């Protein structure tokens, strides 16, 4: 075998080192491109679920008109008689699970899977103790059941309409330095979105109840009360 000259050996080594460097650099680039591709697809895999839990309201006829006025907070108006009142305690909870990909340098792209439950922990319809006559009691009960229906309809619709906007909000991943940063960042992100949704939901519910308690609505109730037996009629 012929001897190889030192200069040729050095060139061969240099070429080999360059080939290895390019191979490693190309491999890292491929991994990063794969990471970015996985991140772009992440929004398509996110799971969003919103559920409404129904409740059967209870009826309470143990409170007086005076007590109901106090419960309603309308104590400043001595001429406002509260013969019926609906008290609901809304319930809203959510959970999230992180969904992420980790890049070759440890960077994390992440989105949350979110599940939401909404409904009521309790709902009670108060009818004043003074309402002994069936006709008047029925009229007031019908009015309060409008409030019950408003609560339920608003929350049921909220659950149905929530999934679409949440999918849109959580369609583009956010990037974090570490998994711990991703977990903390997703928590804040979900909390803020849920806070805004809850605020809008309750604002809409309050608007619906104000419409039910409008002067026009009260006039309708009063007209119905006037059709009850005269001996049982009292100012509403």
Image: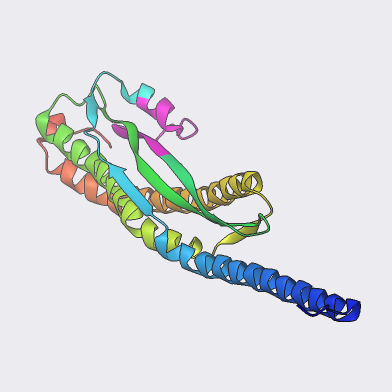
Q: Is residue 142 left or right of residue 198?
A: left
Instruction: Look at the image and tell me whether residue 201 can be seen.
Output: yes
**Bounds of the magenta segment:** 68-92
Q: Going 47% across and 30% down the picture, which residue do you hit?
A: 75
Q: Is residue 85 left or right of residue 30?
A: left
**Residue 90 at x, y percent in the picture:** 39, 37
- State whether residue 214 appears in this view: no
Q: Nearer the viewer, residue 187 or 25?
A: 25
For the point 16% across and 24% down, the residue is 132
Residue nearest the observer in this picture, 186 or 156: 186
Q: Residue furthest top?
A: 62
The location of residue 110, given as percent across then percent down, is: 55, 56
- Extreme residue toward the front, this view: 1
Q: Count the marks.
A: 0
**40 up-or-down from 184: above or below:** below
Colour approach in the figure? rainbow
Q: Nearer the viewer, residue 2 or 13?
A: 2
Which image quarter holds the C terminus?
top left
Of residue 225 and residue 27, the one placed in the foreground of this image is: 27
Which quadrant would the N terminus be assigned to in this image? Answer: bottom right
- Residue 185's place in the image compared with 9, above or below, is above
To which quarter of the image does residue 216 belong? bottom left
Magenta span contains residue 91: yes
Within the image, what quadrant is residue 14 found in? bottom right
Residue 63 percent across, percent down from the top left: 30, 20
Q: Is residue 183 left or right of residue 43?
A: right
Q: Is residue 129 magenta?
A: no
The residue at the point 27 percent across, 36 percent down is 235
Determine the residue positioned at 72% across, 76% down: 19
């Amino acid at each position: 075998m012929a001897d190889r000259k030192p200069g040729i050996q050095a060139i061969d080594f240099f070429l080999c080192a360059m080939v290895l460097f390019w191979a490693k650099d190309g491999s890292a680039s491929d991994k990063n491109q794969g990471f970015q591709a996985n991140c772009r697809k992440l929004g398509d895999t996110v799971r969003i679920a919103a559920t409404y839990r129904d409740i059967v309201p209870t009826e309470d006829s143990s409170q007086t008109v005076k007590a109901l006025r106090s419960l309603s907070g309308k104590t400043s108006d001595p001429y406002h008689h509260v013969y019926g009142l609906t008290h609901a305690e809304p319930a809203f909870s959510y959970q999230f699970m992180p969904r992420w990909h980790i890049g070759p340098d440890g960077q994390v792209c992440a989105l949350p899977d979110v599940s939401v439950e909404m409904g009521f922990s309790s709902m009670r319809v108060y009818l004043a103790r003074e309402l002994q006559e069936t006709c008047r009691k029925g009229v007031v009960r019908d009015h309060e059941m409008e409030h019950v229906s408003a609560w339920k309809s608003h929350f049921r619709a909220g659950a149905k309409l929530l999934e679409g906007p949440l999918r849109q909000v959580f369609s583009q991943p956010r990037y974090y330095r570490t998994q711990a940063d991703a977990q903390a960042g997703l928590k804040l992100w979900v909390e803020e979105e849920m806070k805004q949704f809850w605020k809008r939901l309750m604002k809409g519910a309050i608007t619906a109840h104000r419409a039910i308690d409008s002067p026009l609505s009260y006039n309708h109730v009063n007209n119905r009360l006037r059709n009850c037996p005269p001996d049982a009629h009292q100012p509403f």
